Amino acid sequence: MQLTPTTYWLEHAWLGTNVEPGVVVETGEGRITAVRTGIEAPPPGAEILRGLTLPGLANAHSHAFHRALRGTVQVGSGTFWTWREVMYTTAAQLTPDSYHALARAVYAEMALAGITCVGEFHYLHHAPGGERYADPNAMGEALIAAAEEAGIRITLLDTAYLSSGFGEPPNRQQLRFSDGDAQGWAERAGQLKEGRAHARIGAAVHSVRAVPADQLRTVARWAQDREAPLHVHLSEQTAENDACQAAHGCTPTRLLADHGVLGPRTTAVHATHLTDEDIRLLGGSGTGVCMCPTTERDLADGIGPAVAVQEAGSPLSLGSDSHAVIDLFEEARGMELNERLRTRTRGHWTAAALLRAASADGHRALGWDEAGALRAGALADFTTIALDTVRTAGPLPRLGAETAVFAATGADVRHTVVGGRQVVRDGEHTLVPDVPAALAAAIDALRA
């Protein structure tokens, strides 16, 4: 958080419905204290952010250690399930120290891409073989510290992962993930420290195959008692749906509904293979849906019914999940373009709606309702993209939202401000001096 009040002059700013030129944003104690439009020249002493400034982006679904798989899992073909075996091998190498180093670099990469808040879907809890560390939350604390050092906010979605599939015990690779039962998970997760300025604690059900049906309600009540966000992988694979039907005679969505998991503070991640009834259950309960288009296409999972779930009442957010790329502009663009391919029609969302999914609605899914907008009282989290790169040059500034969604990439981010402090300045991270080198070192250490 910033130590002194700072005034920023934004050459252009997206204010939720339109782009305004010459906007002054005053910040203090980590929040926006005033927004003034029509200011043609920078006030004396103001920090000048040239380009288009947007609210900070929220990456609503992350597995930080999956960043180490980039490139490696692109060799050959395979399936989601063969990809998972490679993921297990990487997970087996991590310690609290090596995970901290990797996550710090990954979160710095996110800041360089304009992401100011991440939802970390965290299930790598214990040492190999399932033995607890002296601090049973050492791995989660490593992630929280990594986010602070990279200058971004985090919601640690501590994840219950108890079974290899519908009541089967965890396999050898999954022993690190399991707390034995939901009560054991709740007791450990309950020890995580609350009240940190940059971090909040939420919960997650890994999936209906990984948490037995009779223990789902324990996780849901834990989140409900704390008014915390609750996330769950849902129907990412048809095999999961088939196995749920065989075990329980219903879809995963119906199983979650029957055990009190769905609701306005819950976010279903992927929600790719849904029935019409599933869509009604999600929308009718106000359950959010987080789409992760770059991962869903990388793993050949399929295209989820994003339009249908939103029309039914589910707010949408976006995540980079396995980090095949870290680029929320690409996720927003991918959601629209996937739907165009599926339906052969254009214009399912406006650029403004897609930016809201990547910012305000993503923050709400992570329990940061006071972020995601350039307005007085909001957290002073925003990012600026250049409008003079080979991708963004040409369109009129008033078309900035369309330029951001349909042309820009994370490489066009020039500045990122979190809590009033400039974390990225002129495309360089101010806290992690050489992010590519930090990524390379952290990933090389795992190979070694």
Image (cartoon, helix red, strand yellow):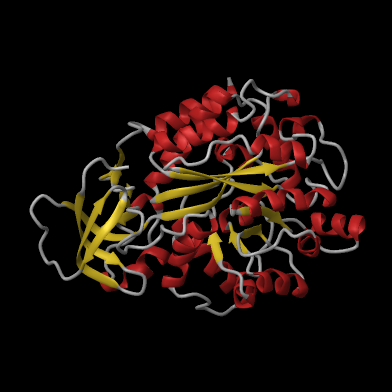
For residue 414, say whether it is visible.
no
The answer to whether residue 184 is left or right of residue 147 is right
Quarter occupied by residue 15: bottom left
**Image x and y of residue 354, in percent:** 47, 68
Q: Residue at x 33, y 47 (%)?
A: 419
Quarter of the rendering occupied by the C terminus: top right
- Relative depth, front residue between 369 and 48: 369
Q: Residue at x 52, y 40 (%)?
A: 194
For residue 352, say whether it is visible.
yes
The answer to whether residue 263 is left or right of residue 5 is right
Quarter occupied by residue 133: top right
Quarter of the rendering occupied by the N terminus: top left
- Relative depth, front residue between 76 and 51: 51
The answer to whether residue 426 is left or right of residue 366 is left
Total marks shown come to: 0
**Image x and y of residue 110, in percent:** 43, 45
**Image x and y of residue 397, in percent:** 26, 69
Q: Residue at x 50, y 60 (%)?
A: 364
The answer to whether residue 134 is left or right of residue 334 is right
Q: Is residue 78 above or below residue 306?
A: above
- Relative depth, front residue between 199 and 253: 199
Q: Residue at x 59, y 60 (%)?
A: 291
